[in-house]
Image: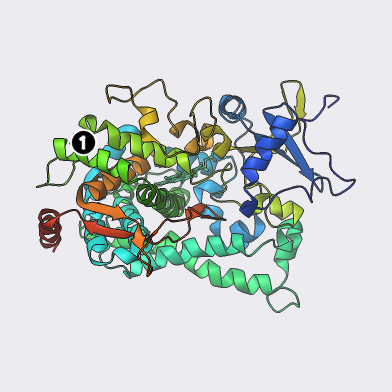
């Protein structure tokens, strides 16, 4: 306790750095990196109203704290509105470090470890075929189609639910729950997060509007937890469930549990968490891919040469083609690196976590929480500190990735066109760290890979042309909130040729 805190901007008495903390729209990850440079330190600290936040600007520090010392760096802060009132406390990502979280991770690992996740490739393939067909008919609905693709993949893998239309009721159920997280987190801060005792106020009490709001959101959150799981249970009675995570979990953990109610709850929670963790993240990564393709037609061209050589134009790429398609692998890696889905720690799930203490829009977004006092590099880090990895800074480190703002898949390849293992794989940071690392990462990479390979083999993605006859270059702007998503941008997406168009039609018939 006699040791200094890590360096950072000098705060004001009482409020600390309350007025220094940048908003998400102001590229906070760049500000944290700049503060690190000013203080010549890879780790910086900001504090506000007694809350300590430490940002790790390099991979080395993030690994040392969040990975090597993960036994004490893996808790999450309490979020009263989101978890206790809206009811998302069952989300694996929101659970405090403890037995329910450990059991949920064990189940997630059972389904999504590198070896077991491969069995879901046919589901990913099928969802991708539908996506191609939807893109053919409605290229202008790119983001809706991506949302449908991600949702359909997860519902099929999670519960063997076959989602067909864009407005399928299962997608609507899951999206309503996911929206309630964004709305809770985007709505700003709730006093109840700072003064938890307010959660006991009755709905009719003046000023307790948050209770009413929480009830509305809670209904959709409960539905996501229960409805698809109970549907599987019903179908299991008549043996109508194909291989999926729900069936396999019930068989592996649910046959003779010590505590049936607890095991049942953890299974529901683990499965419900797949949609919450996996849908929007995949949409964001694939949105960045389309943006990068519009901006870099020469990269599409190079990818197509590889695809035409290996796959030809009479079929779609298969996972078995992957070893012969290193350039597609490189595009996947560069997409995860270029504009990371979660640029700052787990911005993903917790824009609230610091705001709940500091009551401002735009505080750094989340963390692993430290459960014991610790010392790093001569600095004191007290218990309760929120530790955030600056993923953007790590993936834009010019030493690891020269000209980091440039979208350049070639950086991952050797001159002979094979993958260069000496270039740092963006997965070292893009999916988080330590015991909290994303359990869906292998599935995410698989499903992004098959989508990118299939889209590039079927479509040409071009700049749109304005009324003045000139091409419109997207400005590459991102919406930075819950996650980073590219803002809608104009583009033209067309089958590459008549031959490809025919193949798309055939696919539709096969699915029908
Ligand atoms: C491009 C896609 C994805 C990205 C970039 C991504 C990124 C992340 C990140 C950064 C975290 C926080 C890790 C930490 O706290 O250090 C996380 C957690 C999580 N992700 Fe993913 N993810 C993706 C896809 C998926 C998919 C497809 C699933 C499920 C099928 C999933 C399920 C989860 C869950 C359950 C957690 C919470 C883990 C915990 O707190 O223990 N994610 N993800």
* Ligand 1 under 8 Å from disc 1 Cβ: no
In-front residue for pair 86/504 = 504
Q: From the viewer's perspective, is residue 279 above or below residue 62?
A: below
| Residue positioned 72% across, 36% down in the render | 35
Q: Residue furthest right?
A: 13
| Residue positioned 59% across, 51% down in the render | 350
Q: Is residue 431 left or right of residue 446?
A: right
In-front residue for pair 102/213 = 213
The image quadrant of residue 309 is: top left
The image quadrant of residue 160 is: bottom left
Residue 435 horizontal/vertical position (percent): 52, 33
Quadrant for the N terminus, please.
top right
| Residue positioned 54% across, 57% down in the render | 88
Q: Is residue 51 left or right of residue 491?
A: right
| Residue positioned 76% across, 33% down in the render | 382
Q: From the viewer's perspective, is residue 51 above or below residue 202?
A: above
In-front residue for pair 221/140 = 140
Q: Is residue 189 left or right of residue 94?
A: right
Quadrant for the C terminus, please.
bottom left
In-front residue for pair 420/125 = 420
Residue 283 horizontal/vertical position (percent): 40, 53
Residue 298 horizontal/vertical position (percent): 31, 42
What residue is shown with label 1? Answer: 306
Q: Is residue 507 left or right of residue 289?
A: left
Residue 172 horizontal/vertical position (percent): 39, 68
Question: From where the camera sits, is residue 110 visible?
Answer: no
Dot 1: what SS? helix
Question: From where the camera sits, is residue 417 visible?
Answer: yes
| Few, some or many residues within 10 Å of mark 1 (<14, 14–19, 20+) | some
Q: From the viewer's perspective, is residue 15 above or below residue 227?
A: above
């Amino acid at each position: 306790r006699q040791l200094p805190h890590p360096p950072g901007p000098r705060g004001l008495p009482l409020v600390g750095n309350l007025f220094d903390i940048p908003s998400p729209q102001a590229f906070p990850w760049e500000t944290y990196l700049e503060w690190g440079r000013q203080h010549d330190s890879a780790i910086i600290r900001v504090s506000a109203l007694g809350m300590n936040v430490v940002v790790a600007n390099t991979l080395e520090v993030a690994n040392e704290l969040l990975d090597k010392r993960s036994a004490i760096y893996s808790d999450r802060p309490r979020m009263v509105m989101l978890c206790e009132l809206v009811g998302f406390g069952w989300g694996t990502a929101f659970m405090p470090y403890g037995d329910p979280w450990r059991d949920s991770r064990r189940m997630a690992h059972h389904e999504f470890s590198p070896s077991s996740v491969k069995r879901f490739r046919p589901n990913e393939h099928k969802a991708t075929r539908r996506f191609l067909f939807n893109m053919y008919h409605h290229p202008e609905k790119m983001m809706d189609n991506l949302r449908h693709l991600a949702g359909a993949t997860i519902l099929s893998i999670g519960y063997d639910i076959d989602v067909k239309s864009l407005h399928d009721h299962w997608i609507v159920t899951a999206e309503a729950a996911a929206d309630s997280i964004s709305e809770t987190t985007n709505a700003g801060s709730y006093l109840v997060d700072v003064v938890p005792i307010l959660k006991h106020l009755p709905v009719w009490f003046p000023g307790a509007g948050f209770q009413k709001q929480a009830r509305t959101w809670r209904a959709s959150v409960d539905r996501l937890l229960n409805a698809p799981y109970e549907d599987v249970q019903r179908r299991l009675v008549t043996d109508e469930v194909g291989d999926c995570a729900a069936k396999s979990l019930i068989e592996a953990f649910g046959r003779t549990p010590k505590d049936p109610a607890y095991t049942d709850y953890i299974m529901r929670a683990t499965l419900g968490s797949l949609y919450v963790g996996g849908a929007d993240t995949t949409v964001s990564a694939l949105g960045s891919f389309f943006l990068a393709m519009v901006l870099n037609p020469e990269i599409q061209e190079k990818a197509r040469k590889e695809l035409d050589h290996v796959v030809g134009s009479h079929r779609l790429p298969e996972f078995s083609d992957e070893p012969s398609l290193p350039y597609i692998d490189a595009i996947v890696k560069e997409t995860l690196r270029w504009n990371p889905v979660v640029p700052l720690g787990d911005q993903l799930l917790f824009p609230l976590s610091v705001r709940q203490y500091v009551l401002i829009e735009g505080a750094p977004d989340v963390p692993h929480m430290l459960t014991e006092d610790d010392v790093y590099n001569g600095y004191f880090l007290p218990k309760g500190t929120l530790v955030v990895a600056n993923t953007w800074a790590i993936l834009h480190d010019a030493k690891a990735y020269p000209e980091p703002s440039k979208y350049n898949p070639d950086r991952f390849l050797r001159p002979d066109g094979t993958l260069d293992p000496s270039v740092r794989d963006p997965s070292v940071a893009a999916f988080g760290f330590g015991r909290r690392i994303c359990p869906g990462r292998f599935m995410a990479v698989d499903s992004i890979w098959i989508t990118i390979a299939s889209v590039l083999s079927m479509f040409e993605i071009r700049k749109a042309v304005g009324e003045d006859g000139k091409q419109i270059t997207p400005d590459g702007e991102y919406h930075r909130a819950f996650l980073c998503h590219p803002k809608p941008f104009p583009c033209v997406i067309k089958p590459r040729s008549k031959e490809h168009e025919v193949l798309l039609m055939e696919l539709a018939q096969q699915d029908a």
